[in-house]
Amino acid sequence: MKHLLKLGDLTREEILSILNLADQLKYERKNGIKKDYLAGKTLGMIFQKSSTRTRVSFEVGMRELGGYALFLSNRDLQIGRGEPVEDTARVLSRYLDAIMIRTFEQREVEDLAKYGSIPIINGLTDYCHPCQVLADLMTIRERKGAFKGLKMTFVGDGNNMANSLMVGAIKMGMSFAIACPDAYRPDPALVEWAKANGDFTMTSDVLEACKDADVIYTDVWASMGQEEEKKIREEAFCGYQVNAEAMAVAKSDCMVLHCLPAHRGEEITAEVFEAHADEIFEEAENRLHAQKAVLVKLIK
Ligand code: CP
Ligand code: NVA
């Protein structure tokens, strides 16, 4: 594994190996065992969109591994003024040991990897969010013990989260159902891949998708960059909510996950959110452990 550009690039074994290392790093942190796996290494973090979790967990993660993280906003970089990504990649490769980038187009992340000579980590694009899904899988395995036979349901927009979750769930042997409006389905090529490689269902009926679910996942109706569509999305997604009715048809021990930030009263009710807050905030914590594992695998 040279980069983390999207989950589809990783084998099931590579994902498991990241999760195993993440568990170990979590254990070491909890027990005060400090090892400088990345002493003297520097991660550049390019942000073209906002972030709380990704920024802080990568920065703290590098620090805990004995390395250093550099926050690079596109407001300050020449990339924000049009310097080509292929030049940025070749320059930054000479200073840094790896780059984490959060941006709009997946193409930009792929180009950094193509033109640079250091590991590139996708910290979210409009297409996918692989770091989040590694933390989600870690959280599911902690609580459920294993993946095989579990049903994961996603309620809402067929967005970057849905695109990554369906790949992650199916690779790990879970079945995956998505309830979304017809006009907001996940990436068609990924839908074809999911149908060919696992147990995948897509419906516009939230209760049908949530029936017998072991894990229910949701995300915002309007993602970063879609602020202007907020009104029309509120209408389109009305009813695509994780609420008491959805939970009533799921398994009695069904987990609820959310990548955050959450909009209570939209994609999830405040009641369901608070009832599952332990899982949701453990999931947020696991971003740190899972990303530390990715950093060690890619840089060490
Ligand atoms: N889930 C997630 O990526 O959060 P941030 O946008 O705060 O980084
Ligand atoms: N779909 C959301 C995820 C945020 C972590 C977005 O792209 O804004």
Image (tube, rainbow, N blue to C red):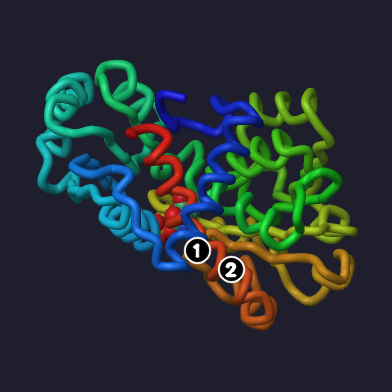
Describe residue 209's horizontal placement relative to residue 128 as left or right. right
Q: Where does label 2 land, which residue?
A: 280
- At x 57% / y 37%, what residue is drawn? 17
**Residue 166 occupies quadrant:** top right
- The amino acid type found where label 2 is placed reads Ile
Percent of width and height locating residue 153:
75, 53
Crowding at mark 1 (Cα within 10 Å: few <14, some 14-19, many 20+): many
Element under disc 2: helix
Q: Does the rendering let one see residue 274?
A: yes
Considering depth in this image, is 128 or 35 the residue closer to the camera? 35
Percent of width and height locating residue 79:
16, 34
Q: Where does label 1 land, which residue?
A: 284
Describe residue 22's horizontal placement relative to residue 157 as left or right. left
Percent of width and height locating residue 113:
33, 22
Vertical comparison of 81 with 217: above or below: above
Percent of width and height locating residue 47:
27, 47
Asked whether disc 1 touches disc 2, contact meaning CB atoms under 8 Å apart, the reply is yes
- At x 66% / y 75%, what residue is drawn? 276
Element under disc 1: helix
- The amino acid type found where label 1 is placed reads Ala
Describe residue 125's horizontal placement relative to residue 206 as left or right. left
Considering depth in this image, is 208 or 89 the residue closer to the camera? 89
Vertical comparison of 78 with 268: above or below: above
Vertical comparison of 84 with 257: above or below: above
Considering depth in this image, is 226 or 277 the residue closer to the camera? 277
Q: In the rendered image, which quarter contains the C terminus?
A: top left
- At x 64% / y 24%, what residue is drawn? 189
- At x 28% / y 55%, what residue is drawn? 59
Q: Does the rendering let one see residue 55?
A: no
